[in-house]
């Protein structure tokens, strides 16, 4: 494992159901140790020559930095948006026991 940095992947989706589907897939596939889902966000953004306003749901996926590309690919495969928000946020410090758990729960399944 060359990159053991921990990141929070910030994602937005169109509904709580889509968030649960994507979040569960990321955890089941060990691309994230945990996801948090926040419903009820309002987003305002330009899209196709108009200013849009939409209700969205936020996912924060806790994972290793070296899994970001695989996580992003999986999110794109499951996502309903043409251009989904998939952003890696670095972490400054992580409590040692939580870090050990997160590392154990991501990547290959133990045999």
Image (tube, rainbow, N blue to C red):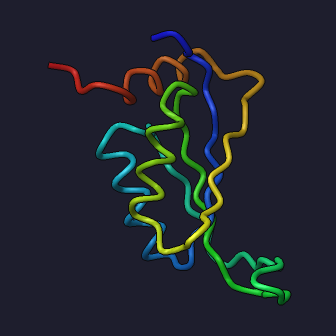
Image-based side of 105 in relation to 110, left or right:
right
Q: Residue at x 30, y 42 (%)?
A: 29
Q: Residue at x 63, y 40 (%)?
A: 8
Residue 102 spot, x, y in % from top left: 47, 27
State which quadrant residue 4 falls in: top right
Residue 38 spot, x, y in % from top left: 62, 66
Position of residue 72 relative to residue 76, above or below, is: above
Q: Residue furthest left?
A: 111
Which residue is more in the foreground, 39 or 86?
86
Residue 83 spot, x, y in % from top left: 61, 66
Q: Residue at x 44, y 37 (%)?
A: 33
Position of residue 60 relative to residue 103, above or below, is: below
Q: How many marks?
A: 0
Which residue is more in the foreground, 56 or 98?
56
Position of residue 88 relative to residue 49, above or below, is: above
State which quadrant residue 89 falls in: top right
Q: Residue furthest top?
A: 2
Position of residue 24 relative to residue 98, above or below, is: below
In the rendered image, the quadrant that contains the C terminus is: top left
State which quadrant residue 41 falls in: bottom right
Q: Residue furthest front?
A: 49
Image-based side of 39 in relation to 45, left or right:
left
In the rendered image, the quadrant that contains the N terminus is: top left
Residue 65 spot, x, y in % from top left: 58, 27
């Amino acid at each position: 494992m060359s990159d053991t940095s921990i990141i929070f992947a910030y994602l937005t989706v169109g509904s709580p159901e889509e968030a649960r589907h994507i979040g569960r897939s990321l955890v089941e596939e060990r691309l994230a140790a945990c996801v948090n889902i926040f419903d009820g966000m309002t987003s305002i953004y330009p899209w196709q020559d108009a200013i849009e306003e939409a209700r969205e749901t936020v996912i924060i996926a806790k994972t290793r930095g070296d899994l970001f590309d695989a996580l992003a690919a999986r999110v794109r495969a499951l996502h309903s948006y043409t251009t989904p928000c998939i952003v890696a946020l670095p972490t400054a410090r992580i409590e040692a026991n939580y870090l050990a758990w997160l590392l154990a729960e991501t990547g290959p399944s133990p045999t």
